[in-house]
Image (spheres, grey):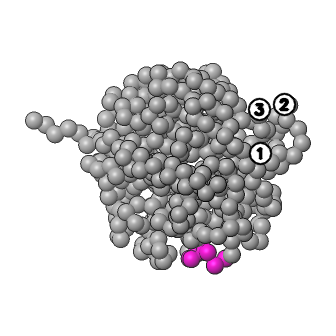
Amino acid sequence: MQVMRKMTMVAVALALVAATAQAENWPQWRGPFANGSTTETNLPASCDKANEMWSAALPGHGAATPIIWGDRVFVSSTDPAANAVVAICVSAADGKILWQTRLGDDAKAPNNDMATPSPCTDGQRVYFLTGSGDLAALDFAGKVLWSRNLVKEFGNTCIKYGYSSSPLLLGGKLYIEMVRRAKPYVGVPGIEGTLEPFVLAVDVATGKDVWRQIRPSDADDESLEAYTTPLPFQAGGRAEVLVLGGDYLTGHDPETGKESWRLTYNKTHTGKWRLVAGPVAWEDLVFMIQPRGNHVMAAKIGGKGLLPDSVVVWTSEGRASDSATPLVYQNLLYMLDSDAKAMTCFEPRTGKSLWRGALGGTAWRASPTGADGKIFCLSMDGEVAVLAAGNEFKILSRTTLGDGQTQSSIAVAGGRVYVRTVHTLHSFGKPAAKP
């Protein structure tokens, strides 16, 4: 057992080193470091027409963040003409659609569709998960290597606004969470009885289960539901996969799925605390947001079982985000308050608020992105705001792209900024200098 645990720690450490070496790529949701940042430089300070390299039309709506590996951009989208969710590959050089592959059927949820989970890639295969439960691995030519449907296997997602969690790719496995209530809003043929929340690890080469861990919760009503994504974490000599939702943050052994500990963020078990914003880590701290615009909590994880309140080292004052996952960039923590339309910058060790600045406009529900000393934000109305990173609130530019209700986070790779609006994928960069 001790040997296995050491092997796990080595595997995760190697995976994190690989992510650092591939910082020019954006391999999965929240980027190469799982915190919304990248080491990319030489990026434009504005996403306006002067800096637009190309735009590519998408067949339908979707909230999935584009991912980038080398000269390929991957994104999922609905295709209303075919009532489908499709995987799309775009040339990073010129925006040409290289291929489009059907993943499964589309379905409707309030203010959502089935093209919300973001894909991920290891440079050999690209992995897609849809809100309808379709999980597939494709090669870079668009050929389906394996596929399965998690809803048909394990039952309805039981999430009111549509399943939205993205898979975490780490150490040759896809980690997938289904933090759900016991009874579905609508039925799924062939699945009856009480449904359990769980965490699943899938082998990327075969698509087969490595393990499935039931994750019980005593949360009530809508608080049983989460739209978050698993987070890799390593501190105190222990590698873990973290899952946030159902009133708890839990730590799981990457090799077995066994739960090591849990920490509650909803002590009174308020029933309407469905969780949208995911966790983020910095050094030995994990940051999480209480739902419905409550507080940011910072916890120093350690121990086993139900952790005491003393592991929470600080809790913010005032409002926090309801939907945007925080950003850790250049040793600062940024929290985009989705509905109050403001950004707050924290000193991560102490929770001291360094500044809070108003963005105005409409709601800002996409998670912010940090790169090249800048913070890129995207509003629901398709407005891109670029802020200066650091100890002072400063807006560098604002550009309205429009195109309807936009929810996808901004991705950065290869000297380009990728913005996905409702029907269009945009690529922005600094124009080449004239000879």
Quadrant of the image containing the N terminus: bottom right
Q: Which sits in the foreground, 404 or 154? A: 154
**Residue depicted at x 46% and y 41%:** 27
Q: Earlier in the sequence, mark 1 or mark 2?
A: 1
Q: Report x, y in % for residue 97.
A: 43, 24
**Residue 57 visible in the picture:** no
Side (left or right) of 315 relative to 374? right
Label 1 to label 2, Cα distance in Å?
14 Å
The residue lying furthest to the left in this view is 435
The residue at which mark 1 appears reads as 158
Alpha-carbon distance for marks 3 and 2? 8 Å
Disc 3 crowd rating (10 Å Cα; few below 14, some 14-19, many 20+) is: some
Q: In this view, does 236 lie above or below 176?
A: below
Query: Does the rendering let one see residue 94?
Result: yes
Q: Which amino acid does label 2 sit on?
A: Pro
Marked residue nearer the N-terminal end (3 or 2)? 3
Q: What element carries label 2?
A: loop
Q: Tell me, for residue 189, which label it has, or none.
A: 2
* Tag shown at residue 152: 3
- Identify residue type, mark 1: Cys
- Location of residue 417 with respect to 79 vertically, above or below: below
| 18 lies above or below 113 | below
Which residue type does callout 3 highlight? Lys
Q: How far apart are marks 3 and 1 (CA)?
A: 13 Å
Sequence-first disc among 3 and 1: 3
- Residue at horizontal 42 percent and vertical 54 percent from the top: 37
Residue 238 image offset from top left, x and y in percent:
56, 61
The residue segment tinted magenta is 309-315
Left or right of 415 in this view: 335: right
Q: Position of residue 418 (x, y in %)?
A: 40, 41
Q: Nearer the viewer, mark 3 or mark 1?
A: 3
